[in-house]
Amino acid sequence: MSQLQPDYFTADSEVQSLVNQLKQLRTKRVSDIVDEAGHQYIDLVMEGGGVLGLSLVGYTYGLEAAGIRFRSVAGTSAGAINALLVQALGTPFDAKSEKMIAAVANMPMASFQDGNKLSRLATEAWLAGKHWLWKYSVSLTILRSLLKAMFGLTVVESKRACFR
C-alpha cells in the first residue's frame, strides 16, 4: 500500500479556505515573542481525547498556518502524543504539522485498538469488508461472554481452546 502524503488532506478545498482565513490572523498579536519571519511563539498544552485526540494534529496545523510556533508543549493522553510529535519533528522555528499529518495518516490504527486478539480480528475483518469473518469473530466473542457470565468459565486464547 502506498504512503499517504499530507496534501491528501491539506489540498482539500474546504481546508484550503480555512487555511487562507487563518493566514489573515497572522497580523493579530498573541505573543510577546516574534521572530524575523513574523512567527509568534507560544507554549501549548493539549488535553486527551482518545481517537478524537488525533484532531489535535489538525489544530496544530491551523495554528502554524496562522504563523504560530511552539516554544514548549505538554499534554495528557492523546495530547501528550501530539506534544511529543511537535517536539520530536524539528526545532521550535520549524513548521511540523505536515510531517505529523504524514506520520499519523500512515500509522496502523488497528494497533491502537484495545481488546483481545479476537476482538481485533473482528474489527480488522469488518474494515477489510470480510463481513463473514467479522460475524464469526463477533459470535465467538459473544459466546465467550456468555460462558463467563452464565458458568464462570473463561476461554483462554491459545492454539487449543481450553476453559478455566
Image: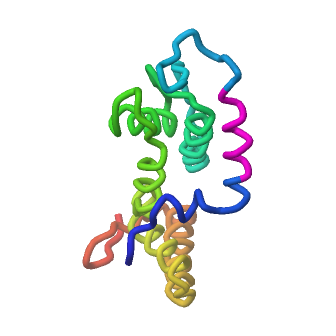
- Position of residue 28 relative to residue 118, above or below, is above
Left or right: 1, with 119 as reference point:
left
Q: Where is residue 114 in the image (x, y as percent from the top left)?
A: 46, 56
Q: Residue furthest front?
A: 36
Locate the C terminus by quadrant. bottom left
Q: Where is residue 110 in the image (x, y as percent from the top left)?
A: 44, 64
Q: Which residue is drawn at 35% across and 39% down?
A: 89
Locate the N terminus by quadrant. bottom left
Colour setting: rainbow
Query: Which region is colored magenta?
Result: 17-26
| Magenta-colored stretch includes residue 22 | yes
Q: Which residue is drawn at 38% across and 75% down?
A: 2
Left or right: 152, with 25 as reference point:
left
112 or 53: nearer the eye? Answer: 53
129 or 4: nearer the eye? Answer: 4
Q: Position of residue 91 (x, y in %)?
A: 35, 30
Q: Which residue is drawn at 49% across and 26% down?
A: 37
Q: Residue at x 67, y 46 (%)?
A: 19
